[in-house]
Image (cartoon, grey):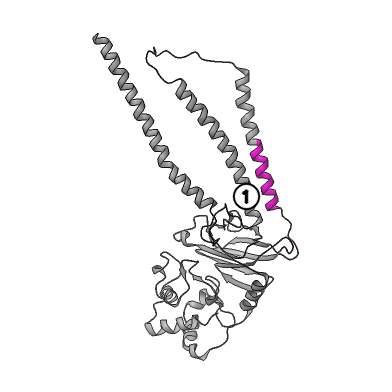
Amino acid sequence: MRKASTADADSEVRQARQVRSLAREVAAIAALLPGVLLAATLCFGAPADPSQIPSIFRPQSTPANSILHLSLLVLAITGAIFAVVFSLLAYSVRKFRQRDGDDGREPAQVYGSNQVELAWTVIPILIVLVLFLATARVIHSIQDAPKPAGAIEVIAIGHQFWWEFRYPTLGVVTANELHVPASNPANSTPTFLTLLSADTDHSFWVPQLAGKTDLIPNRSNHIWIDPQETGVYLGQCAQYCGTQHAKMLLRVYVDSPQQFDEWVREQKRLWVSNDTVAEGRRIFETTACVNCHAVAGTVADGRFGPDLTHLMSRDTIAAGAAPNTRENLRAWIEQPDSIKPGSLMPAMQLNEKDLEALTDYLETLR
């Protein structure tokens, strides 16, 4: 009688443990569901402003669209594999779990099944082959795309920690904010970028327009985009390149063809002398500023830092680290580390009067 009571107690203990284990699993799944729903909302939601969340799931360019389709195919295949494996595992755990009265012996083993061996060899090979062919097709369509006659050419140079953009056929040089015209099937005007590095490895990535492409010293890489919707698209360096890698941001402005032509005309316009900021110009041209920065029409012809000819036409400074306001510009000149710790721009150590005069001058560079 006592033995029966002990067996019943052990059985109840095992059942209680199974219930607790099942409860923990249900709780874990319930905790994961909000995260899954949030991720799905962020990926597939459609905010009014396309620049709010850079996402590969809202492509605005042919290369990004091709990458999205490939990603969905891979997700579908791997999701199906997960569903099958998880279902079989759940079935096995449920059907073959330890029960009361089990003697603990190992179940009969199955060896030498040619059908099973063939299945788990051929099926993975076919899956890998499909993924390989789909990936190779997308890579070929992007890498070997022909360049039409009306394409815009840009040389993008990665620096620590900012972007330089040169339009060789248009005679325009700018920094951190790339302007390109919108493209459409009736008037295809893609932008082809040659990617170079001035120092270390960088990576050009605007998720809604194209995939990542590295910028490597002493090597030229290439990428192209043909965005169809006007707007601002955010990107950044996707390869660790030093202290301020996280703040090496970039902005792509997709303009209408008319807006782009107007932007090019404005960028070609030289700075007009302004006597009210003559003192600020003198300070700029007689300090270390000219060793790093260039301003068309002046003696400043530096190449180490961004071209400042049309500084105030940009929405941000310090490669997107701060809005381009007078207060931020002044702080950036006085103490760059206050905005971007570890940046390579030195503090100019100017007195208050000279700092104000230099800021006044820079504000005229539009």
Give above or below for 278 relative to 184: below
The quadrant of the rendering that contains the N terminus is top left
Q: Quarter of the image holding residue 151? A: bottom right
Name which residue lies at 67% across and 48% down. Answer: 138
Name which residue lies at 45% across and 24% down. Answer: 93
Question: Is residue 134 covered in magenta?
Answer: yes
Q: Quarter of the image holding residue 164? A: bottom right
Q: Mark 1 points at which residue?
A: 67
Total marks placed: 1
The quadrant of the rendering that contains the C terminus is bottom right
Name which residue lies at 46% across and 80% down. Answer: 287
- Residue 82, percent across and down? 53, 34
> What residue occupies the far right of the structure in this picture?
149
- Residue 228, percent across and down? 65, 61
> What residue occupies the far bottom of the structure in this picture?
275
What main secondary structure does the magenta stretch of the protein show?
helix
- State which region is magenta: 129-150
